[in-house]
Image (cartoon, rainbow, N blue to C red):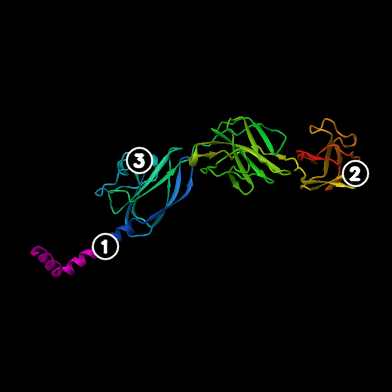
Amino acid sequence: MKILKNIENFCCRYKSYLLVLLLFVVAASISLGQNISSNYEIIETNVNNVEFKLYNENQESEVIIVFRKSNIDPIPPNAELNYKANTDYSQKNSSNLTGEDNMVIFNGVLSSEQFIVSNLEHNTDYAIDVYFNNNSTSNKNYQITTLAEEPTEQVGRMLNSVPTDNKLVVYYQKGNGEKSYLLVGENIEPTIPEDGKIYSTTNNINTTSRIDDNTFIFLSDNNKEFYIEGLKPSKTYYLMAIEANGNNTKVNYLVSIDKNTRQVTTEPEAPKNVIVTIEKNKRFKLQWEKPENVSNYELDVAYDSEFMNKLENFDSIRFGDTDRFIIGGIKKNKNYYIRIRSINENGFSSYTETLVNRIE
């Protein structure tokens, strides 16, 4: 009990000093927190250059910025040395290195500075370490990467199949890139992809990545052809194949030479919502919803579901732009199989589902 009483007396006697000490610790903590407040913005990444901007909210703090390869351990600066900053990575020397491959690119009071670090290796990951007030550990760390080298030979000759059932195959002659991509513009020439940006690709136009609202991107899985499905009917598509090197954020697309754009138009859509009704107990009335961009229709009526035994007057009969048709000459107690498809200048649609009707 006597010990506790002594502690109580000490705290009461020196409480003002303790309060000052506590405030000093809090102020120091706040000051340190302000000193490590910075953010980063990448401006541009090239094959062997990177350009970025660093912002420091506390503009009174001393900052040393170190640039290194990501696979090299960070080595903090020595507080007793005065480093001579340099942004040419080929000029590393004892005056600007904190240790192996750790090059000082800035030494001073940082506010808002833009940097271009040059003569880097292509297709390589780098790190940026920011040290405040000669701190022995990095207060901020940022990752950056250079692009792979751009291919030099673009995709050569391209051929494509006739679009059928909303599917298309594009055959091509490989360039000298690691990968081949197909850009598909819907009703407009495709937009070029951005270097360093990755796109998830599938074979289906409805699930593959978009470069913008009208441009889709596909990746060849065999360096011989692109297989595309899910195309929309009665649409014009512009196709352009390009080469690329590198993976993920290192990807570099070859887009600086002549385009090899091809143009294809898909077949029309089949008639929709087809309905067959019986009129006057002796004929069929066929009605449907008209698809876009259709000029004609072709109708088959047969006695069998394989359409091997067609009615003489309804064997691939064609008629003009309408949404109804009368089928006469129908016999009672007999099944009739009916199908119809659309026609325009780009070809034929698929047939509608077979309809089966009879008059009792």
Hey, what amino acid is under mark 3? Answer: Lys
The residue at which mark 3 appears reads as 92
Depth order, front residue of 119/44:
44
Q: Could you say where residue 323 lies in the image, as x and y percent from the top left?
A: 83, 48
Question: Earlier along the polypeptide chain: callout 2 or callout 3?
Answer: 3
- Secondary element at tag 1: helix
Q: Which residues are magenta?
A: 1-28
CB atoms at circles 2 and 3 under 8 Å apart?
no
Judged from this view, the residue extending furthest toward the right is 329
Hey, what amino acid is under mark 1? Answer: Val
Depth order, front residue of 316/212:
316
| Between marks 3 and 1 in the image, the one whose residue lies nearer the viewer | 1
Q: For this view, does 336 lie left or right of residue 225?
A: right
Q: Could you say where residue 201 lies in the image, as x and y percent from the top left?
A: 57, 40
Q: Identify which residue is drawn at 64% across, 41% down.
A: 184
Hey, what amino acid is under mark 2? Answer: Lys
Q: Identify which residue is drawn at 32% across, 49% down.
A: 138
The residue at which mark 2 appears reads as 282
Magenta segment's dominant SS is helix
Disc number for residue 26: 1
Does 79 appear in magenta?
no
Q: Could you say where residue 76 lies in the image, as x and y percent from the top left?
A: 29, 46
Q: Could you say where residue 229 lies in the image, as x and y percent from the top left?
A: 65, 38
Would you place residue 225 above or below residue 112 in this image?
A: above
